[in-house]
């Protein structure tokens, strides 16, 4: 993957696709779900996967909403794998059971991430260790794919120390663990409070063996400091919404807002060189990690964004009081596997 990624910049490294915006939960901080939408038809998802394969995409991550609500999610995973791409999924885990895990094995899923917000459910989030622990045990027993448990601090999460409990349980079960920071809905970085910083340091210690490869970017996020980097979203990282439009990321929807099926290598090349105004305060780790391999490459320019064909999707206001981020999907991973 790294060799392919380094050998050319004319293809996406990672694309996130949304087969369904509906979710079975309603986390207070989330703006990436509804409670009514239908699944994107299987054939349409196949067309999108095929197009991403044609663009040379390396990894496709399926998220939502809740992707396991899609009745044909196994077929979508299978389609990704048949093209030789890596298939990942981000889920709230509620719909996992032994049979479901075995089906994901058969479909060829390679990576799964569950975000757990707290130990006990509260009014902010029901993604709780108490509710999900049995499902984690099933995953430990049956899953043939890699499992990462992401816990969160900041925002409306009332007990920061829960992240450490979740992280330790993940390691106990043989999973990797990460921690994400939820920031306020204005999109600005804010330093962690002392108690939250202590948890962050604890997660670093928990994952000491892998922390060394993390960089200043994540440390700055925890401290609330801006980062200087070149975001290659729209090029190396694509966010494909349920309507099939390409966006820079979940937090910059509407740019460029071009239908995936019309997306070409010319778009990829242009976006590669386009400076993203939001980069200094960005907290989206997957975009950063995807862009990191190209940090030494061509500097970016201040060009006008391609077009905002869907301005109503740009900078969505948060539905809750705390953050514009779904913790399933887009909070930054501060501690990596
Ligand atoms: S954070 Fe995830 S589980 Fe919660 S409402 Fe949003 S999509 Fe659903
Ligand atoms: S918010 Fe972050 S990932 Fe999204 S376009 Fe801006 S810099 Fe890139």
Image: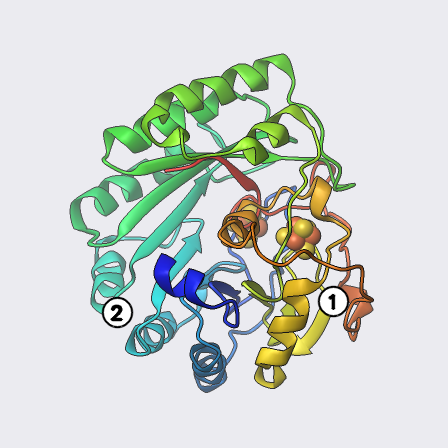
Find residue 2 and report its horizontal and vertical position in percent.
Answer: 37, 57
Distance in Å between CA atoms under marks 2 and 1? 32 Å
Numbered disc 1: secondary structure:
loop
Find residue 97 and report its horizontal and vertical position in percent.
Answer: 27, 53
Residue 146 located left or right of residue 188:
left
Q: How is the image coloured?
A: rainbow
Q: Which mark is residue 254?
A: 1
Numbered disc 2: secondary structure:
helix
The residue carrying pointer 1 sits among few (fewer than 14), some (14 to 19) or many (20 or more) residues within 10 Å by Cα, namely many
The N terminus lies in which quarter of the figure?
bottom left
Residue 218 located left or right of residue 324:
left
The quadrant in which residue 73 appears is: bottom left
Q: Is residue 118 above or below residue 126?
A: above
Q: Nearer the viewer, residue 108 or 1?
A: 1
Q: Residue at x 47, y 85 (%)?
A: 47
Residue occupying the far left of the picture? 141
Identify the residue position indicated by label 2 in the image: 107
Q: Residue at x 62, y 66 (%)?
A: 234
Q: Does the closest atom of ligand 1 sit within 8 Å of the Cβ of label 2?
A: no
Residue 1 visible in the snapshot: no
Find residue 30 and report its horizontal and vertical position in percent.
Answer: 63, 47
Q: Residue at x 62, y 59 (%)?
A: 298
Is the residue under label 1 in contact with that under label 2 (CB below 8 Å)? no
The residue carrying pointer 2 sits among few (fewer than 14), some (14 to 19) or many (20 or more) residues within 10 Å by Cα, namely some
The quadrant in which residue 85 appears is: bottom left
Q: Nearer the viewer, residue 120 or 230?
A: 230
């Amino acid at each position: 993957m790294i060799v392919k990624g380094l050998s050319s910049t004319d293809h996406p490294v990672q694309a996130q696709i949304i087969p369904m915006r509906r979710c079975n939960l309603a986390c207070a901080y989330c703006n990436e779900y509804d409670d009514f939408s239908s699944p994107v038809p299987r054939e349409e998802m196949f067309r999108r996967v095929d197009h991403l394969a044609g663009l040379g995409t390396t990894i496709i991550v399926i998220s939502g909403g809740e992707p396991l609500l899609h009745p044909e999610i196994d077929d979508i995973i299978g389609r990704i794998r048949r093209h030789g791409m890596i298939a990942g999924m981000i889920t709230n885990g509620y719909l996992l059971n032994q049979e479901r895990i075995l089906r994901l094995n058969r479909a060829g899923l390679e990576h799964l991430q569950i975000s757990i917000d707290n130990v006990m459910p509260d009014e902010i989030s029901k993604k709780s260790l108490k509710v999900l622990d049995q499902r984690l045990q099933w995953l430990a027993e049956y899953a043939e794919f890699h499992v990462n448990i992401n816990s969160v601090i900041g925002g409306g999460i009332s007990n920061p120390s829960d992240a450490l409990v979740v992280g330790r349980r993940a390691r106990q079960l043989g999973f990797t663990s990460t921690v994400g920071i939820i920031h306020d809905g204005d999109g600005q970085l804010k330093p962690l409070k002392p108690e939250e910083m202590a948890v962050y340091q604890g997660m670093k210690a928990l994952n000491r063996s892998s922390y060394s490869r993390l960089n200043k970017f994540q440390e700055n996020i925890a401290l609330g400091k801006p980062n200087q980097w070149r975001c290659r979203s729209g090029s190396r990282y694509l966010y494909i919404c349920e309507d099939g439009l390409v966006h820079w990321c979940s937090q910059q929807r509407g740019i460029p807002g071009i239908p995936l099926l019309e997306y070409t290598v010319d778009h990829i090349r242009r976006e590669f060189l386009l400076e993203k105004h939001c980069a200094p305060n960005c907290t989206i780790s997957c975009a950063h990690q995807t862009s990191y391999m190209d940090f030494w490459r061509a500097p970016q320019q201040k060009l006008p964004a391609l077009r905002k064909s869907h301005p109503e999707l740009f900078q969505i206001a948060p539905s809750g009081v705390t953050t514009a981020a779904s913790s399933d999907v887009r909070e930054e991973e501060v501690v990596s596997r």
